[in-house]
Image: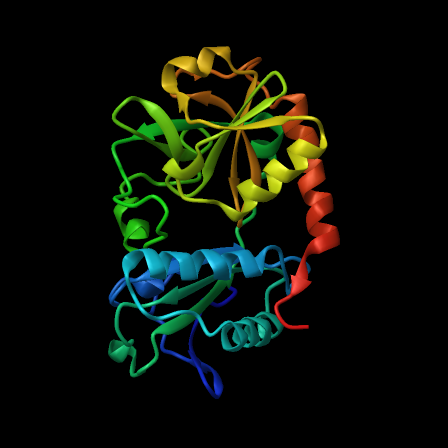
């Protein structure tokens, strides 16, 4: 079994920290720590990353919105990510980095920036081929533009990954779809691509996909979709930095379009894969 690893990001490089016995994924490593803000992404070709600088920018923006004076030491963190990714024994890794609210003293460290790696769990090919169903949740983000780590714990009652409940959506008081609990929700209607704008966490992958869609003639509209509008859209999908694009064929009992992944979803999936091949880079250099 491939390892789950945790490191303190220090001036002298990444320092290994103890990992709780039985930890199944990177998220569980932070359960007993003073949570702050985080970001998560995946490797490409073992040690390359897509949009790493955008993840750093979003983390610094989250820190600023919380009113915290700290900012990432980007050079130090990038160096740690590069070193740990190159040493990871699996073919691809799930990578999470955090800025804690206070030092990780429970693990014997005075550092607040931590880095975790775990085996990357790929989206099953059947889900990509046939699409997934998503459900509603009662969850809300107090500040949707801040990626707080406590939300990872809050969403656990709404597990991810089953085909008939692959993700759970966050709706506002007016019944508009803002985002998934771990992804962004994107709708296609004609040649319009609907995003939630500033009412949802700003996803790095969503931003890339929007750029790719514009290049294919789509108008990008920043206006959340009302749940009552689902019957009028042609296609929908989720975006996320660890999963890419995942086609959605139903929300609760409402079928989307034909009930199969649509042609534009497939084209954008191919365009995103090609973009990753061309633009994923090592964390350093």
The image quarter containing residue 64 is bottom left
Q: Is residue 123 visible?
A: no
Q: How many numbered marks have been drawn onto this rendered protein structure? A: 0
Q: Where is residue 31 in the image (x, y as percent from the top left)?
A: 27, 62
Q: Which residue is drawn at 56% across and 47% down?
A: 122
Picture quarter containing residue 139? top left
Looking at the rendering, in which quadrant would you find the C terminus?
bottom right
- Residue in view at x 56 percent, y 60 percent: 52
**151 relative position to 257: left or right:** left
Is 31 located above or below residue 165 in the figure?
Answer: below
Residue 13 is left or right of residue 62, and the answer is: right
Q: Is 159 rendered above or below residue 67?
A: above
Residue at left 68%, top 50%? Answer: 276
Image coordinates of residue 197 in percent, x first then y, are 44, 35
Q: Which of 3 and 108 is in front in this view?
A: 108
Does residue 229 appear in the picture of this structure?
yes
- Judged from this view, the residue extending furthest toward the bottom is 12
Picture layout, residue 122 above or below residue 178: below
Where residue 27 sits in the image (x, y, percent)?
A: 37, 58
């Amino acid at each position: 079994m491939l390892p789950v690893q945790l490191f303190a990001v220090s001036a002298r490089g990444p320092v290994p920290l103890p990992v709780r016995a039985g930890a199944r994924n990177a998220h569980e490593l932070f359960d007993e720590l003073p949570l702050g803000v985080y970001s998560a992404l995946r490797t490409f070709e073992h040690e390359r990353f897509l949009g790493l600088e955008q993840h750093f920018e979003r983390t610094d923006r989250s820190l600023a919105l919380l009113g915290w004076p700290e900012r990432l030491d980007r050079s130090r963190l990038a160096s740690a990510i590069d070193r740990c990714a190159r040493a990871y024994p699996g073919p691809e890794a799930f990578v999470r980095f955090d800025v804690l609210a206070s030092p990780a003293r429970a693990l014997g460290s005075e550092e607040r920036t931590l880095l975790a790696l775990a085996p990357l769990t790929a989206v099953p090919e059947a889900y990509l081929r046939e699409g997934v169903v998503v459900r509603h949740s009662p969850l809300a983000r107090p500040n949707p533009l801040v990626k707080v780590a406590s939300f990872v714990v809050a969403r656990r009652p709404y597990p991810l990954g089953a085909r008939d409940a692959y993700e759970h959506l966050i709706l506002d008081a007016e019944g508009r779809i803002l985002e998934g609990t771990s992804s962004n929700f994107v709708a296609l209607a004609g040649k319009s691509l609907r995003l939630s704008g500033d009412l949802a966490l700003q996803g790095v992958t969503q931003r890339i996909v929007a750029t790719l869609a514009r290049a294919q003639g789509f108008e990008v509209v920043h206006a959340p979709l009302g749940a009552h509008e689902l019957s009028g859209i042609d296609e929908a999908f989720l975006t996320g930095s660890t999963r890419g694009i995942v086609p959605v064929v139903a929300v609760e009992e409402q079928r989307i379009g034909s009930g199969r992944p649509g042609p534009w979803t497939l084209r954008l999936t191919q365009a995103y894969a090609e973009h990753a091949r061309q633009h994923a880079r090592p964390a350093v250099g």
